[in-house]
Image (cartoon, helix red, strand yellow):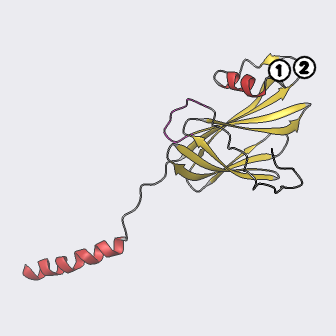
Amino acid sequence: MTGRLLCAGLLLPLLLLAAGPPCRAAEPAARCKVRVVLARPGGGGVDPAIREPLKGYLAGSFGTRYDAFELLDTRTLEIEHGTRGEVPLPDDSWLRLTHLGTQGEFIKLSMELPGVKTLIRIRDGGLFFQAGHRYRNGMMILAISATTTGKTTETPSAPRPEPREPHGETHEGRRPAR
């Protein structure tokens, strides 16, 4: 019996060493909802399929230039940490989102479109707009919301401020702001 206890006493530390260091809690998956909206001037109002709060955010953010908003598509992606999801867009291009993890109450994503690759941070349950792509006599707006906790307030994430340039230097031919 003593031999078995001695053997078990020697094996237990070896088994613990073989198991490796304790694992960190896994990052939760990000549930991303991508709505593709066509914004156009010339009237037409807001598509009834676009509900609050998105309806109000579109009017507030883009309403001085566009007064017609049409929902073209809605896709939901469940993206595990470190993996990428892809959404086809109406113009035969794509949007790719890679879940890079969380930072406090923010979800970090790599966002790729043809010719564009950037890092974005969306408040958990928040909303991010990607706009500027011309499409069908208007502009395609991507309304991207993300959550890891299940809450969906869809509060817009504040845009990052433009990088400041050192005093007296220009960037790509622009003059510094005065």
Q: Calculate the distance from the C-alpha at mark 1 to the C-alpha at mark 2.
A: 7 Å
Tag 1: amino acid = Asp
Q: Residues within 10 Å of mark 2 (few under 14, many from 20)?
A: few
**Lateral position of residue 41 relative to residue 1, left or right:** right
- Mark 2 element type: loop
Q: Which mark is residue 67?
A: 1
Percent across and percent down for residue 57 are 69, 26
Residue appearing at x 69%, y 44% in the figure: 161
The image shows residue 169, relative to residue 141, as above or below, that is below
Residue appearing at x 23%, y 74% in the figure: 12
Q: Earlier in the sequence, mark 1 or mark 2?
A: 2
Marks 1 and 2: CB-CB under 8 Å?
yes
Q: Residue furthest bottom?
A: 3
Q: Is residue 99 magenta?
A: no
Q: Is residue 148 magenta?
A: yes
Image quadrant assignment for residue 65: top right
Percent across and percent down for residue 77 are 62, 42
**Which secondary structure type mostly characterizes the magenta part of the structure?**
loop
Q: Mark yes or no: residue 167 visible.
A: yes
Percent across and percent down for residue 35 are 71, 33
Q: Residue furthest left?
A: 1
| Labels in figure, total | 2
Between 139 and 93, the one lying in front of the other is 139
**Lateral position of residue 91 relative to residue 7, left or right:** right
Q: Mark yes or no: residue 90 visible.
A: no
Residue appearing at x 90%, y 32% in the figure: 136
Tag 2: amino acid = Gly
Say which residue label 2 marks: 42
Q: What segment is highlighted magenta in the picture?
A: 147-155
Residue appearing at x 28%, y 78% in the figure: 14
**Lateral position of residue 119 relative to residue 20, left or right:** right
